Image: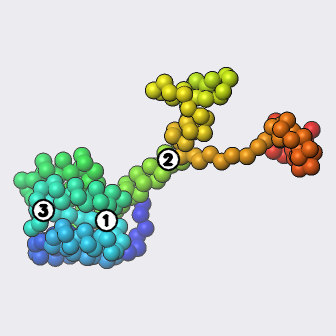
Amino acid sequence: MVDRGMIRVLLIEDDSNDAELFRELLQAERISIDLRQSRELSSALALLSAEIFDIIVADLGLPDSNGIEAFSRLHTLHPQIPVIVLTGLDDEELALKAVQMGAQDYLVKGRVAGSMLARSIRYAIERQRLVTELEKSLKEIKTLKGLIPMCAWCRKIRDDRGYWKKVETYIQEQTDAAVTHGICPDCLQKIDPRAFEMIGKDKPDSDAPPGSSS
């Protein structure tokens, strides 16, 4: 679970009574929060550009946006911040659509107890953290798999569209790796035996694994 310390919450809500109730519910649960409120989507986006928040709790009906537009803009511009949607009693279908688009949860006004609100916030932050870590891990372990058609003569590789490309071009297109160039001891010996004798004779055997002895 997330750290029980200060949670930085951005509440996007234009109803002062609902905003005060939100604050009171969390205070009753003794959750340490730094709560900022925005009454409009535009001011919320300005805050998000200037400050760091752990979570966004957003009403879908705002003076300068309505329906799913508010969530869509928030999630598109700040996909790394979890969002909980606040909805009225007759807007649950809209809230479910927001969840399908990436919202972590939705809460129906008038039906939210303090314990439910606190749990929803903590779970949303934790789920977002896990999703972020998973996406990072997937990028880090991205590798080439399967059979790779390679020309036995020029060593070019045929891609999925049938084009033959240099090995380094293919690697750079298929992975996050960057290719640098050097010269191995075997090639150095063939191209410039004298240079090999001067700088290559003390190098380990090119076919031997690091740390092995002949």
Where residue 50 appears, as percent x and y from the top left, is 33, 75
The residue beneath circle 2 is 139
Tell me the residue that label 1 is attached to. 55
Query: In the image, is residue 176 above or below residue 48?
Result: above
Q: Residue at x 25, y 48 (%)?
A: 101
Q: Residues within 10 Å of mark 1 (few under 14, many from 20)?
A: many
The residue pinned by badge 3 equals 65
- Image quarter in which the C terminus is found: top right
Of label 2 and label 1, which has the lower sequence position?
Answer: 1
Q: Which mark is first along the chain, 3 or 2?
A: 3
**Is residue 172 or residue 129 the one in the foreground?**
172
SS state under label 2 = helix
Instruction: Determine if residue 86 is in view.
Output: no
Dot 3 crowding, Cα within 10 Å, few <14, some 14–19, many 20+: some
Question: Label 2 sits on what residue type?
Answer: Lys
Label 1 SS: strand
Q: How is the image coloured?
A: rainbow
Q: Is residue 193 above or below residue 132?
A: above
Q: Name the element at disc 3.
A: strand
Q: CA distance from mark 2 to mark 1?
A: 24 Å
- Mark 3: which amino acid? Ser
Q: Quadrant of residue 152?
A: top right
